Image (cartoon, coloured by chain):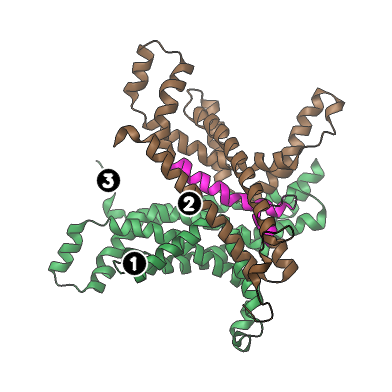
Amino acid sequence: MDESVAFFLSIFPRLLAALPLTLALTAISGAVGNALAVPVALARLSPNPFLWIPSAIYILLMRGTPLLVQTYLIYYGLGEVLPGSFIQQTFLWEYLKDGFWYAVFAFSLNTAGYTGEILRGAMSAVPKGEIEAAKAYGMSKSLILWRVTLPRAIQICLPAMSGETILLLKATSLASLITVWDVMGTSRQIQKESYRIYEPLLAAGVIYIVTVFILTRLLNFVERRINQHRAAPVSA
Amino acid sequence: MDASSPSLLSLMSFSQDGWGARFVEGLVVTVQVSVAAYAVSLIFGLLGASAKLSPYRSLRIIADGYTTLVRALPELLLLLLVFYSGADAIKFFLSFLGDDYADIEIDPFAAAVGALGFIGGAYMTEVMRGAIQSIPLGQIEAAKACGMSPLLRVRRVILPQMLRFALPGMSNLWLNATKDSSLISVLGSFQDILFMGYRAASTTKHYSFFYTMTALFFLVLTLVSMAIIRLIEARVNRGYK
C-alpha cells in the first residue's frame, strides 16, 4: 500500500508537465470555437434559406454525432487526403504532422456548433426595445450587431458558455486517443510503462478536478465582472 | 473519392461480408449499451436525487460528492477507472462471502454499462432533483392530507408530476448516452459502431469514407431518438396545451 502511494505521488511531476498542453488545447479550441459560433448563430437566425439551412445542418451534425467520431474523421480523414496535396509544400505541413492541431481543429468545430446554438437562443432573447432604440439612433445593421445585439447576447448566455468551457476542458482528454500527450495521454502512457492501472488514472483525475475547480472559479469571476451592473445593490 | 476505387459504396454492402452488415451489428451493440446504461443512470439518478433532498446531512454530503466529482472528471478517464476498478471492487466485496466468489468473472458488458450508468447518473441526479423541486408543494401536502403513505406519494404524485419537468433534461441525457457509448470502443472488447468504423477504416485504408459512415449511423440514431422524444413529450404534456 505504501509503495502504491509513493508511486502515486511520484508521477505527479510528469502529469503536471502535461497540463499546459491540456490547457492550450482548451484555450485555443475555446477561442476559435467561440469566435466561429458568432457567424454560425447569425446564419442560423437569418431569414435567407441559403444561410439558415446550412447552419442548422452544421449544428445538427456537430451535436448529433459523438465528438470522438468527429475527431477520428478529421485526424484520419485529413491524414488520408493531405499528404501529396499542395498543403505539403506550405509551411502548414510542419504543424500538421502533430495530432495536436487536428485535435484543435476538431474541438473548435464542435464548440462552434454547441456555442452557436446557445448564442442563437441568447441573440433572440435580446429585448426588442434595445434594438429599436439603436435603430432610432440611426445605427447601421452591423453597428447594432457589434454594439447592442452581440454584447447583450453574450451577457445573457455567459453562464451557459462557461459551462461549455468546462465541458471542453474535459473533452480535450479525447485528444489522447490521437497521440496527443496531454494529461490523459500521459497517464495512459505511464499505465503502459508501469503496468499499473489505478495510480496513473487517479493522479490524472486529481489534476482534472483541481483544474476544473480553478477554472470554474475563474469563469464565475469573469461572469460577475461582466455582469457587474446587473448585480443586486449592496445593502447597507 | 479517387478513381482507383470505382465504388466505395460497394464496400458498404449489406451482404454477408459487407461492412454495411457489420455496421448494423455495431448499431445494435451501441443501442444495447446505451439503453442499459441509461436504465442504470435512471436508478443512480433517482437514488442521488432522493439523497440530495433527504433530511439526513450525511446522505446529502455523499450525493453532493458524487455529482461534483463525476461532473468534474473527463468521461474517458471515469470510464477507464470505473471499468477496471468496478470489477475489482465487486470482487473485493464478494470475497468476504467466501472464497468461491473470489475469482468470479465480471462480464465486460456489465462493467461498461455500470461505468457509463454511474457517469450518466450524476447528471441525471441534477435533472431529477430540479424536477422534484418544481412540483408545487401544495400537491404533496394534499397527498399527505389524503393520508397517502410516502411510497404511495412517490408513485401517485411525485413520479408522474416530475416527469413533465424532467423530460427535457432526460431527453438530453439520452442523446448524450448514445454519444458517450462510443467511448467503449476504446476498451477494445466491444464491437460498437465506432469500433466497426475503426476496423473498416484501418483494413481498407478508406478513412474519410468509413468515419463519415460512422458519423451518419450516429446521426440516424440521434434523429430517430429526437422523433421519438417529440412523441413522448406531446403525450406527457397532453394535459397542458
Mark sitting earlier along the chain (1/2): 1
Mark 1 belongs to which amino acid?
A: Leu
Near-viewer residue (B232 or A4) = B232
Decide if residue A125 is in sight here: yes
Mark 2 belongs to which amino acid?
A: Thr
Near-viewer residue (B235 or B101) = B235
Q: Foreground mark, 1 or 3? A: 1
Chain for disc number 2: A
Mark 3 belongs to which amino acid?
A: Ala
Q: Colour of chain A?
A: green
Residue at x-position 63% and y-position 80%: A82
**Disc 1 to disc 3, how far (Cα)?**
32 Å
The residue identified by callout 1 is A42
**Disc 2 to disc 3, how far (Cα)?**
21 Å
User: How many numbered badges does the structure rendering display?
Assistant: 3
The residue identified by callout 2 is A216
Chain for disc number 3: A
Near-viewer residue (A164 or B43) = B43
Q: Which mark is residue A232?
A: 3
Quadrant, the N terminus of chain B: bottom right
Residue at x-position 79% and y-position 45%: A4
